[in-house]
Image (cartoon, rainbow, N blue to C red):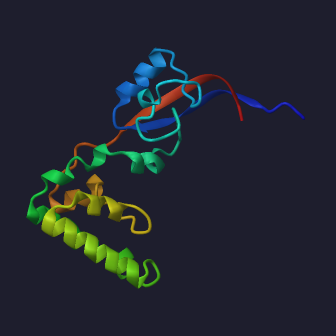
Amino acid sequence: MPELPTVAELTGHHVTDDPRQVVAALQGGVPLDRGRGIDEAAIEDLKANGLYISPYANLWMGRSERKWNFAPRLTPAERTAIAEAMLRQGRLTDPGYLTDWERGQVLRHLERFTEGGDVDSLRELARQPYNFASWKPSFLAPLGIMNDELPYIVPVRAAGTFPI
């Protein structure tokens, strides 16, 4: 079997709720892969398998819990504004994006969120198949709502030999 090529440097980003965990693991020389008897809680900050880096940080934002810290503080009027904005989005009204059952689920989750402040319902609507990015500042700012607790995007440059 031929030898696999290697690369000398990997660059990308690590998305995290608390960059201190990863920095401490790297500075402490903690192995960053699973299965070596290490304390995985020290590096598993976003439910990933050790340290990951990606040139596409936005693909990893969904793993963040921090981005939802703003939601329990919302007033009833702010919850209603978010729900109304979601109802105006094409993914709810365009045929073919959601099934009738899924549209019904959206309405049930929005009712739980607006009437009772159920943050889990808001989180559910950010997942597949709904994909409402209601935590993003670009969604919230036009409604006069601020989310200042976003995930950290940490640039990473790793040097060494990495089989690909």
**Residue 129 versus residue 67 in the image, above or below:** below
> Picture quarter containing residue 139?
bottom left
Which residue: 55% across, 24% down? 37
Q: Please state, as top left, top right, bottom left or bottom right, where the N terminus lies in the image.
A: top right
- Choose between 84 and 128: the one closer to the eye: 128
Which residue: 34% across, 41% down? 151
Q: Is residue 137 visible?
A: yes
Which residue: 45% across, 21% down? 25
At which x and y percent is residue 146? 18, 51
At which x and y percent is residue 67? 29, 47
Which residue: 34% across, 32% down? 18
At which x and y percent is residue 99? 43, 81
Q: Please state, as top left, top right, bottom left or bottom right, where the C terminus lies in the image.
A: top right
At which x and y percent is residue 123? 31, 58
> Picture quarter containing residue 155?
top left
**Residue 107 versus residue 79 in the image, above or below:** below
- Choose between 132 and 103: the one closer to the eye: 103
Q: Is residue 87 visible?
A: no
In the rendered image, the residue lying farthest to the right is 1
